[in-house]
Image: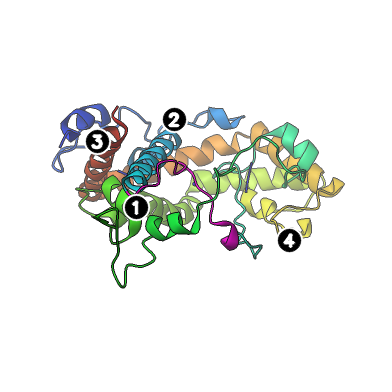
Amino acid sequence: MRTAAFAAAVVLVTLAGCSAADEAPDTSAYTDGTRVPKVEQEEDIPELPLARYEFGDSETQRMTRAQARTAQRCMADFGFADFPLDPALPDAMNIAGGRLVAVAMATPFGELDLDEARRWGYGWDPKPSDDGNGKKDRAMTDAEYRVFHNVDRATGRTLNGREVPEHGCSGQAAARLTEGVEDTTRMWTYASSRSEKLAGTVRKDPDVSGALRTWAACVEDKGFKRYEGREEAFRDKAWHRDDDGNTRRTQRERDTAVTDIECAREHNTVGVWWAGEARAQSADVETHRAAYEAVRRDQDVVRANVRDMLGN
């Protein structure tokens, strides 16, 4: 709930828009923030400009599948014919330990699901999910693990007359995914780092800061604490998050979460905020056009790799 890589690139460039560094970026797939959308639900939030320079959920799933199948074929070459697509660690390595929990809002602009707010406030259902999400296949054997990660790389190893890849079948699959990419770090992190940097500036946009003040006054007028913004409400220490990141879901918390959303809907806070983000991001694309287009070219290389790895 609340708890986010990659020739035949000619075809992909056509689908993704212009790619030449000296051309203006194609803005046909997004708005530049000159209009303010009406936002009440998460699905009402339009795509932001920088989303075009990051891989979407469906693309990420294809990349994961392509990498898993490539690693699986590699393992079969070493005699592990039934190696699973999504293996768990060997049983001896599955020991309980501490967890690093990152808790984030459902959207960058705050929560929007009133039903969830009424039931769980700024937290979520504490009962374990039984939908099977995140469930791994069988555990690797120790022998499989040693080849999958090439534990013996320091001394070198051959198996079935073949030399195990330097970083194992897992590393070989990862390398195949980004083969031909000019700058992997830039491809994976440029858009997200620019977005993070711009976010603080957007909060100072007159329209955005005004919308947040109006939202804050609305929440306060309804008898609740005055917050600087919606994230501050979400992260209020009064909700006493546990080690798993969940809150206590008290009546006060749930009432605050509901009022937070009702005021955001009443004053279209998210719509105004989104428009400010879109303006800032669109301007950033214009200013750093060459870097963004370089990211796009590398993404196209990965997409071509994925198609080749999956055979479609």
- Quadrant where the N terminus lies? top right
Q: Position of residue 215 (x, y in %)?
A: 66, 43
Q: Position of residue 100 (x, y in %)?
A: 60, 61
Image-quadrant location for residue 11: top left
**How many C-alpha atoms fall within 10 Å of the one at disc 3: few (<14), some, or many (≥20)?**
many
Looking at the image, residue 128 sits to the left or right of residue 10; the answer is right
Q: Secondary structure at mark 4?
A: helix
Camera-side mark, 3 or 2 = 3
Camera-side mark, 1 or 4 = 1
Nearest the eye: 266 or 17: 17
Dot 1 and dot 4 residues touching (CB under 8 Å): no
How far, Cα to Cα, is label 3 from label 2?
35 Å
The mark that comes first in sequence, 4 or 2, is 2
Dot 3 and dot 2 residues touching (CB under 8 Å): no
Which residue lies most toward the right here?
A: 251
Asked if residue 304 is positioned above or below residue 244 in the image, the reply reads above
Name the mark on residue 304.
Answer: 3
Residue at 14% from the left image edge and 39% from the top image edge: 20
Dot 1 and dot 3 residues touching (CB under 8 Å): no
Question: Magenta residues, as a range?
Answer: 78-93
Q: Amino acid at mark 2?
A: Arg
Looking at the image, residue 299 sits to the left or right of residue 4; the answer is left
- Which secondary structure is most common in the magenta stretch? loop
State the residue position of label 1.
Answer: 169
Name the mark on residue 35.
Answer: 2
